Amino acid sequence: MNPPPKPDVLVEGLLHRGTKAILAGGSKSFKTWTLIDLALQISVGGNWWGFKCRPAKVLFCNFEIQDGFFTERLEAIKAARGIVGPTPNLHVWNLRGYATDISELEAAIKAQASEHDYFAMIMDPIYKCLGERDENSNGQIAEMLNALERIAVQLNTMILFGHHYAKGNASGKYAIDRMSGAGAWARDPDTIITMTPHEEEDAFVVDMILRNMAPQEPFVVRRAHPIMVRDDDADTEKLREPGKRQGYSLQEVLATFPKQKDGTTSGEWQAVAEDVLGISNGTFHNKKKQLLRKQMVFVSESPGPQKGKYFLSARG
């Protein structure tokens, strides 16, 4: 007897067609930007955080962002990814102001998808589909997730939705326990992706809990507006600690610049910045890159002892 076929892979090592997945993170952790980027990468068969995507049709159900701002985000991400022209495989359904209980939306979603063979649907944010349900009730959340499962199975599409972390510091919890609400949020999806703040500014540790795929090691992504970029050299153990300062302005970092007439090395500057601000290695180098882009400092290319040294520019 032949075994039943496995569902089509959408994102290698991560997502199958016909399954359910959740992306969870804290408030303002760029979840919607990340989901738009993933939808775009699937639609064109691109690469998302090192995972190869199969080109396929995607429906993005946008429950929160106003139409104009959503389009602006999408175009910014396309430009950052070097994608020119229309993306016919990506369909956006703007539903801000129309979000309601998933029981009422289920039929409308199926009708919307009836003329398209969507391999993936992204619903963001999922709390907009709760209706009168309590996100802390296992029974009520299981009922809602069952509705999503019906959509996934009957349309043979992957359902991915965005969810938020519980209030407070999440770094002391296991990745699977960081989501807000009932335990069903973590038990039900086939794929769980969490984004937890790293100790460095605008960086997040990504954990993946996979039911049907081989385990993936945690990794770090950094904000390179408007997308997140994977950084395999960052330490995934350095989660943000409560009460520890994270943000440093460019002017604060610039103020630590050593004022030697013959310039300074990157190491000398970093040592002063670390002593004065307590800034981490990764954050310092990110700020240094920004200061170089803004031409507030420059690196000498002149032959001789000053080559490779940093100097303040007129703007600095």
Image (cartoon, helix red, strand yellow):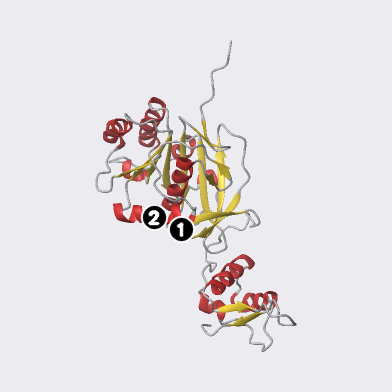
Kindly identify the residue that appears in the image at 63 percent across and 87 percent down.
259
The answer to whether residue 27 shows anywhere in this view is no
Residue under circle 1? 226
Vertically, is 296 above or below 8?
below
Vertically, is 164 above or below 295?
above
Counting from the top left corner in percent of width and height, residue 193 is at 51, 44
Query: Mark 2 and mark 1 in contact (Cβ < 8 Å)?
Result: yes
Side of 71 where 197 appears, left or right: right
Counting from the top left corner in percent of width and height, residue 65 is at 33, 52
Furthest residue in direction top, as rendered: 1
Kindly identify the residue that appears in the image at 45 percent across and 36 percent down.
56
- Tag 1 secondary structure: loop
Furthest residue in direction right, as rendered: 305
- Tag 2 secondary structure: helix
Dot 2: few (<14), some (14–19), or many (≥20) neighbours within 10 Å?
some
Nearer to the camera, 16 or 298: 298
- Quadrant position of residue 2: top right
Q: How many marks?
A: 2
Counting from the top left corner in percent of width and height, residue 45 is at 50, 40
Residue under circle 2? 73
Of the residues shown, which amino acid type is indicated by label 1?
Answer: Pro
Kindly identify the residue that appears in the image at 28 percent across and 48 percent down.
96
Nearer to the camera, 113 or 200: 113
